[in-house]
Amino acid sequence: MNEVFLSVLRSIVGVANVLTHEDPGSDLGAWENDWRGLAQGRALAVVRPASTQQVADVVKACGAHGISLVPQGGNTGLVVGSTPDASGRQVVLSLRGMNKVRRFDAANATITVEAGCVLQAVQEACEREGFLFPLSLGAEGSCTIGGNLGTNAGGTQVIRFGNARDLCLGLEVVTADGGVWTDLSGLRKDNTGYDLRNLFIGSEGTLGVITAATLKIFPLPVATLTSFVAAPSVHAAVDLLKLAAARLGPALTGFELMNQQALALVAARYPQQRVPFHEVSPYCVLLEASDHESEAHGRALLEQLMETAFERELVTDAVIAESLAQSRALWHVRESITLAQAEEGAHLKHDISLPISAIPLFVDEIDRVLQQQFAGIRIVNFGHLGDGNLHYNIQAGVTDKDGGELSRVQARITRTVYDSVASFGGTFSAEHGIGSLKLGELQDYKPAAAVRLMRKLKDVLDPGNVLNPGRVLPLG
């Protein structure tokens, strides 16, 4: 039966674009292995379509033969949502080959791209035309627009521009029955019924396969300024955020929080990097502001902000980048935290979101509880304070080299963190999604009525469970 099915797939996309383990010299590891190394699946085949019609035909074929498929872009997700299971019965639908810019519309301030476009390539295409596509995250050199929208990616500029959902004006989607719904007009106002677009954004490929999108773009700022400051506490950092928002308004585009342990890991693992203030300050903030008048104007505003922050004792030290190279170096410190954690060894990731006003008390409480209950752990707290998203991670203790002790208490630590997050009105998944990794947490912390509605949507839009089964919602 598999050979008949594979023959159908080859007739749709061509022999060279259906990859199987039986092919001479085949290695499907790039599609089968989770980016974080948490899971390794086995695909029946990897299919590489070149057009929306080919995607539609592949989806129809899968439905007709009772085969499920896993849509995949750059495979950079963090919740095991884009790799196949171990059954050898799933098709990986790789959209990387669909990477064209279909239209650039300067007057409408939009760009229409295919789902396989790498995020950095979209950023660069816009920059060449004097525009900014502001979605920015650590994996931007390999993640794709389809995956960004499928997971409603966040990143470092959400405080000003919003998540991927907020940057999307239209989609082209292949539905579970192989139909194609297209709305790429780029309208900012369209009050004609249900918002179908937002059903698919953030659905992680479980309701439809995004094949193209029309995205908002913005004029490039004349200048972008970066400041790295030392803050005595999370309370002071939140007060600094309020002050910066009041003084800078929409010019405030980034506000990243990093605790001392996070920066200490970067300094230890990458001694060639200059990590300001990490030895003397409990917390640091990386603040970014954009100016559409001049660099001098933006710098003056930032300096005035820092003067007031010092007067109010919200900061204890600060540097403002004097060049693009210095700005990149400061951002590189922030972006290196995740890599430093990986090199240091075993750790737990908690991608949480809370009301910004609740963050100081949450951090005070959860830091105290964890340090009392789990001696020796290292708390690595960093993230996008400007939009309430923290990566509240736990590193194994320095004497727990193999992570054995951390593994033993992992479930208890995560439960403690998520229970506290819930008590402060937050969520256990801010920007990474659910995938298959957080199915249990969805059942535990998402209201039952919401889960029932999600299940009804899945049953109606994908009754055959063809699209990414076992992701977002558990099987059965």
Image (spheres, rainbow, N blue to C red):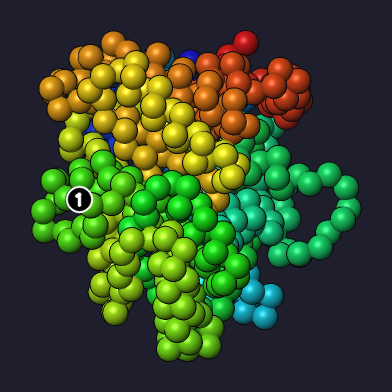
Residue at 25 percent across and 65 percent down: it is: 329
Is residue 291 shown left or right of residue 186? left
Q: Nearer the viewer, residue 257 or 124?
A: 257
| Place of residue 411 in the rendered image (x, y in percent of width and height, measured from the top left) | 39, 14
Is residue 175 shown left or right of residue 471? right
How many numbered marks appear?
Answer: 1
Residue at 68 percent across and 37 percent down: it is: 175
Residue at 44 percent across and 68 percent down: it is: 311
Most distant residue in the right direction: 192
Query: Hey, what amino acid is under mark 1?
Result: Glu
Q: Is mark 1 on a helix, strand or loop?
A: loop
Q: State which quadrant residue 461 falls in.
A: top right
Q: State which quadrant residue 409 falls in.
A: top left
Q: Which of 190 and 222 is in front in this view?
A: 222
Is residue 135 visible to the viewer in this orientation of the structure?
no
Residue at 20 percent across and 20 percent down: it is: 403
| Place of residue 37 in the rendered image (x, y in percent of width and height, measured from the top left) | 29, 29
| Place of residue 397 in the rendered image (x, y in percent of width and height, measured from the top left) | 20, 25
Position of 96 relative to 221 (above/below):
above
Q: Residues within 10 Å of mark 1 (few under 14, many from 20)?
A: few
| Place of residue 471 in the rendered image (x, y in percent of width and height, measured from the top left) | 54, 25
Is residue 475 shown left or right of residue 135? right
Q: Which of 158 and 242 is in front in this view?
A: 242
Is residue 201 visible to the viewer in this orientation of the structure?
yes
Kindly identify which residue carries mark 1. Answer: 279
Q: State which quadrant residue 243 falls in.
A: bottom right
Task: Indicate the quadrant containing the C terminus: top left, top right, bottom left or bottom right.
Answer: top right
